[in-house]
Amino acid sequence: MKKGLKILLWVVGVVLALLVIVSLLAGPIAKGYINNHGEELTGRRVQVDHVGVNLFSGNVNVRGLNMYEDDGVEVFAGFDTLDVGLRLLKIPFKTLHFGHITLAGLHANVVQEGDRFNFASLIEHFSSPDSTAEKDTTPSGWVMKFYNIDISHASLNYDDMINHKGMHLPDVNLRVPGFVLGGEEGSEGGLSIGFDKGGRLNVDANYDTKEKAYHVDVNLDGFAVKNLDTYLADMLRYEALEGNVDAHLTADGSVNDIMKSHIAGTVAVNNVELTGASGPVAGFNTLLVTVNSINLDDNSLDIDEVKLSGLNATYEQRKDYSNVSQLLPQKEPKSVTMQSGIDEGKEEPAAEATEEQKPSKPMQLHVARFRVEDAAVTYNDHTLPDEFHFPVTGLSVSADDLTTAGGNNAQVRATLPGGGHLMMRWKGNLASWKDYQDLFLSIKGLDMRQLSPWAVAYTAYPIEDGIFGLTTRLTITNSALDNQNKIDIFKAKVGNRRKDIDANVKIPLKAALYVLKDKDDKILIDMPVSGNIDNPEFNYMKVVWKTLGNLLVKVATSPARALGNALGINGDGLEFMEVTPGQHGLTSEQYHILSDLSTIALSDSLFTITLTQHMPASDDENAAKYAEWLNGQVRSYIGEQGVPEGRIIVVAGEPLTDPKAKAGYAITSAMKIEE
């Protein structure tokens, strides 16, 4: 063998031997260096169980590495195994080519206290002391290629120590087949996250380097809303919130203009049950939202369908709270500090928004189909003398082409307790609702006994029977409200006024209903309501009650003409009862009128009737005796009807001086209305 060849073989052998020795020693040396100088390098104590280096294959294997918190006791982050394959022959060509990066058993604990995180000291340790130094922006020319990145079964934990909230992700997986920095190759990858209380998120992404375009698929399966308990606690105070979310979304766009990205897909929220401190509040089977497009640049949201099915909600009103108000966090009073030139308790005016802060475009919303199906809503009021229970079932809402850009229309149907039905049609503008609204509402066949607790609370009269109907047309045009209401009541019957109730509205409901009824036992009332909704003193319900109350009081305190019409008698018949001077006893017509008046007087304890006798003027003593005898006949008959003394008053009036004037009794009524 030639001498030169021998020398070459010896050199190669020595180099290989040295490489083997270095490979064998590099791992233990690296391990010792990390364990001994980790704190010097990172500012934290670092411990590693094994480091293996193969200079021939470019493979590095690290096992059992942990970085500790600042106290050096608690573990901040670490992993079980890290295996990296680097192609060393690419380095001379300014290319770092990682054939694979495998990380298993990653675990990290992120802790927040106020505005400081437990990794803040790491950032501070590696921060450049000279923040004013000009950075070198010259391209390095290096290309970094990462292939077969696999992070499996990572466990991440976050705790907010001040607000007592956090999240645990027990199974995080990341898969990236290829990713290049500084080159023109495309990239793709996938992320999988398992949530502690149920559900998994899978994200797959592709990036075209040449076109600067990306495509992302997001799939959320069975995500339990319980995972958000600690965060929702800032907005709601509830005992339990059950339900899960499925979402399938895609996003396409360019990194050159993220705002023009196109987002579409479906979101389904299923089997939701919200329980408050007082019991169940609301729940539903499914809420499905199908999104055609979300465009951030246009601030537009185009939805194909919103469908809510199986809604069941209960509203419980109590003296000082409701089950809904219990869900809202208690607001702490703002502390006011004294400042020079600022009055105590007076807030400083908010700074005006700059042009950059102001939204450039209003939200443009379009919903092609909106449906609520098979909903049930129950209202319970425990503040009334008699508890009010009003369940509405079979509630459905349908609307097509809802938009913030123009007119809309919707239809609502529901079944009311006792066999009643509700139907509503609405047309209006969502964006500028004060400019135009048109609502038609029809209620038919409502059992009035369902409304008895409200009648008792407001009037002290219980409702014992009756069927209620309402037709209302409400329009708003440039803040001017016009509401035409037609009330239709059949066979209404109320009980005696309850003395144990201090009614909010002192009206003679029993007498008024009796007077209002026609010969077919019907009551028809037209009740208009109007006003300007921009007026801070305008209150719709107050206007309704005032209008209705005034109507009932007017009818009940002046019943003669109304009752005459209802009984088919000439309206004047109950305003004046004609008498022929010298007649012997009362006539049939006079008995009939007195009978009707007695019925009215007996219908309500607040109600009194006065009959004022007017007879021709005369100096004859017998004429005066006759007038008193006739008054006695009237009083006697009224007493026979069971009318208590003082409820119908018969008095002598001024003598008639006009020979053409009719003799008889002027009938007036009065009501003890308590303010």
Image (tube, helix red, strand yellow):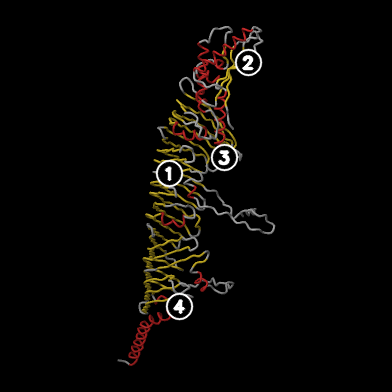
Callout 1 secondary element: strand
Q: CA distance from mark 1 to mark 3?
A: 29 Å
C-beta proximity under 8 Å, tags 1 and 4:
no
Callout 3 secondary element: loop
The location of residue 173, given as percent across then percent down, is 38, 64
Residue topped by disc 3: 434
Q: CA distance from mark 4 to mark 2?
A: 115 Å
Looking at the image, which residue is at 33% across and 88% down? 9
Residue topped by disc 4: 38
The location of residue 299, given as percent across then percent down, is 52, 50
Q: Give whichever of discs 4 and 3 has the lower sequence position.
A: 4
Q: CA distance from mark 1 to mark 4?
A: 59 Å
The location of residue 478, given as percent across then percent down, is 59, 37
Left or right of 140 on screen, residue 64: left
Residue topped by disc 2: 653
Q: Residue furthest left?
A: 1
Identify which amino acid the numbered label 1 is placed on: Ala
